[in-house]
Amino acid sequence: MEAATARAASGRADRWMRPLAVATLVANISIVVTGGVVRLTSSGLGCPTWPRCTKESFVPHGELGIHGVIEFGNRMVTFLLAAIAIATFLAAWNYGRRSVVRLALVLGLGVPAQALVGGLTVLTDLNPWIVAFHLLISLAMIGVSVVLLQRLREGDGAARLVVPSPAAWLVRATFVAGWLVLYVGTVVTGSGPHAGDVASARNGLDPETVSQLHTDVVFLLVGLTIGVLLALRAAEAPAPALRAASALLAVELAQGTVGFVQYFTDLPEALVGLHLLGAALVSAAMTWLLVSIRERPIPTDA
């Protein structure tokens, strides 16, 4: 009886685990977008304190206007993310694989960590370096979500490369370059006009100089990705690795196009928001490439 109950619970976890992992990825991408809306509408201090919206209330009042509504709405998205994270962890626990449980736990703990950092951004009047850290955590959580999805396709055996070692090292270098691009991108944003509130301080760096640095590392990333794609084709790498490399290159080219257009059109809000979405997709795509070059065998019953 107990064994049958355990099998039934495991079966339900199997059915729910992948949809919840997908929902986790989508939710983490979405909160990057909603955070961008807060920043681009100058609503970062729409709720002037934290964890309350005002000193007297957890919800905004009429005097805060639309900015208070936008910031409060973004805070509410955190609760949706928390609900998905809890459901994912419970499904992972019933799923019965330690590797999956650990990843689900990291994603779950990331939600309150992000909330605390978000609160710190408000309490420091949107310090640009803390705002940048806030975004980078979200981008990292997107990467962890991709790893979780990949682990559901794999077994728990020792990882083994499915591409030659030189190609694998080129992929790893591309991943590092991708994170360098994302970091410098947050620095560029902190030097520009969209700081989240008209009165908020910028990071004091010259926007033109850091934008040029950002462009340089983007060219490095695109060059490395092209090199990866050529190396994988030459090595006749498995189709998933080729698809991941192609997807990353496509995202980079689209993201680069948006970046150039927004720079030469004085940073319109819509394009900056699209560029933020692109950063989230870059994080997802480069992580997908990293995990696609190895496999973990699924044990077979004797």
Image (cartoon, grey):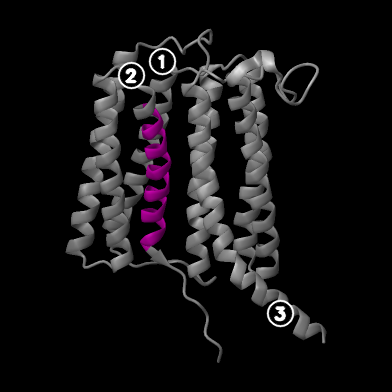
Task: State whether residue 118 is above or below residue 124.
Answer: below
Q: Quadrant of residue 50?
A: top right
Check if mark 1's residue and mark 2's residue have beta carbons within 8 Å. yes
Q: Residues within 10 Å of mark 3 (few under 14, many from 20)?
A: few
Q: Which residue is mark 1?
A: 191
Q: Is residue 205 above or below residue 184?
A: above
Numbered mark located on residue 210 in the image: 2
In the rendered structure, are the residues bearing label 1 and label 3 in contact, judged by CB atoms less than 8 Å apart?
no
Q: Is residue 72 magenta?
A: no
Q: Residue at x 52, y 72 (%)?
A: 155
Residue at (37%, 39%) from the top-left corner? Answer: 278
Q: CA distance from mark 1 to mark 3?
A: 54 Å
Above or below, comparing residue 241 to residue 253 in the picture: below
Question: Is residue 250 in view?
Answer: yes
For discs 1 and 2, the disc positioned in front in the rendered view: 1
Q: Which residues are magenta?
A: 272-293
For the point 28% across and 21% down, which residue is it? 263
Q: Nearer the viewer, residue 262 or 217?
A: 262
Between the C-alphas of marks 3 and 2, the distance is 56 Å
Q: Amino acid at mark 3?
A: Ala
Rendered image: mark on residue 8: 3
In the rendered structure, which disc, 1 or 3, sits on the residue that comes first in sequence? Answer: 3
